[in-house]
Amino acid sequence: MSPDGAIKLVSELLDLPLIDSDGKFCGIVDDVELAGSPGKALTIKAILAGPGAYAGRMPRWALGLVRLVAGNRITRVPWAKVRSIGSAVQLDCPANALGLDKSENRAGRWIPRKGAL
Amino acid sequence: MTAVGGFVDISELVFAAKAGSTFGYALIWVFAFATVGIIVFSEMSGRVAAVAKQPVFNLMRHRLGLKLGLLVLAASMISNLITCAAEIGGVALILNYLTGAPYMLMAVAMAALFIVSIWVLPFEWIERTYGLLGLFMIVFAVAIIAIHPPWDKIAGGLVPQIPPGLSTKELLTFAYFTVAIISAVMFPYEVYFYSSGGIEEGWSAKDLLTNRMTSIVGMGLGSLLAVSILANSAQLFGPANVDPEIPGSAALQAAIPFGKWGLILALLGMFFAVAGAAVETCLANAYSIAQFFGWAWGRHKKPWEAPRFTMTWIILFVAALGIVLTGVDVMTLVEFAVLFSILVLPLTYLPLLLLAGDKNYMREHANGRLAKSLGWFYFAVITIAALAALPLYFLTSGGNG
């Protein structure tokens, strides 16, 4: 599906995985940022990814637990960077260009880069 | 072939041996019935991986939403963690039989070995090492031929039945064993591991036949090993009133016809099969978490290429080891693993059933009439089994009457 047409937010976009131009999983569509005003068409401005975007989508106790473990980060992915939407949202640039790799990189500091065949 | 070796885990070993000694051949049909169930759901999960090119947990969150998805994730995490602890305990116990080394020390050593082997070895090697060496368990199938069992009674066991003349207490125990075997054969981790493996190997629609054959042949032959253990137990332990209470008892089945080498082969087969199950449960858990949150994941990547996934499976191994080190008995862990798995089984298989039938994702490869009918039938069965599991567990003191 092209990102230019009409889209059903919940059934066709929300909670789909994000895949960058290198084919890497780099997040989930946790929320969306909309633009529009009364009498005008509603358009999607950006995808919001990261545990900080869970607010309002889960019970407060669960949100607290998730934030304790995963933090409160939100990464904003401009809608113009979406190439296509299917069983995943395909982005047209690498994750690092959008800041979607920060948590992975932070965790990577703890992992030694040796020993694997 | 790796699926065959990877099919049998500590719970199946224990329940197959106990079922045979307690009820003779009367529970063989439950193994056959549950095997068809795991084939149906494995085939679906492989098909979803090949066609939608997304692992089950990625799509499950989209299909169920964040709240319900998180509930399923938590339920399957707890179930897999307890199962992983049971497998680590089981493998430590088998090493204890083989070497006489202390059980706790062996549990620590094995958890360390698992972490090192997953870190060092490529995915194919992990599968082959544990899966193929688990095929030493074929000694159980050869043993049943060697002891000349009553084949007519074994064939009769394939017919769904309740043995006549059972007291109410025995009937309840029979029902508990039925539920436990369904749970042990249909552990959800097998399906998650299988579908994630399909993604890692880059399956596409042209691999659908391979997927179907792997599900049917792998799970089917693996189930034959479990049935061999049951039949051996019915023939050797039942008449002698031996209750194979500990996993090592099953190995004696191969010792009776083949002596010392039979025993060693059986223990080695059990060791690799249970070790493989420990690796699968832990990786399946890490796959689920990483997929749910959209992290990079996969054992085809180097550990540092998917750091959060790597940290997750290491932490899960340490957590499972922590459960073992509390000193809880392996048999108790096995019972909890089976009990908790059946409780969460409907929650974990429902999303898969919905996904595999969804034409938006699956197009012309969505569930056909047969897959749909079988899928919903088995879903109804596991839901009934899940509702009955806790009452039966308490009424029978975990199948001990």
Image (cartoon, rainbow, N blue to C red):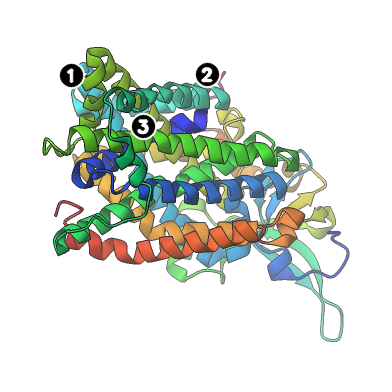
Q: CA distance from mark 2 to mark 1?
A: 31 Å
Q: Is residue B142 above or below residue B160?
A: above
In percent of width and height, residue B326 lies at: 21, 41
Residue topped by disc 2: A115
- Whether residue B319 appears in this view of the structure is no
Total numbered labels: 3
- Whether residue B121 appears in this view of the structure is yes
Q: Nearer the viewer, residue B24 or B324?
A: B24
Label 1 element class: loop
Chain containing mark 1: B
In the image, is residue B114 part of the stretch drawn in magenta? Answer: no
Tell me which residue sits at (72%, 63%) in the image.
Answer: A13
**Magenta stretch bounds:** A111-117
Label 2 element class: loop
The residue lying furthest to the front in this view is: B152
Query: Label 1 amino acid?
Result: Gly
Chain containing mark 3: B
Which one is in front in this view, the residue at disc 1 or the one at disc 3?
3
Q: Quadrant of the C terminus of chain B?
A: bottom left
Q: Residues within 10 Å of mark 2 (few under 14, many from 20)?
A: few
Query: Label 2 amino acid?
Result: Gly
Q: Nearer the viewer, residue B149 or B55?
A: B149
Residue topped by disc 3: B274
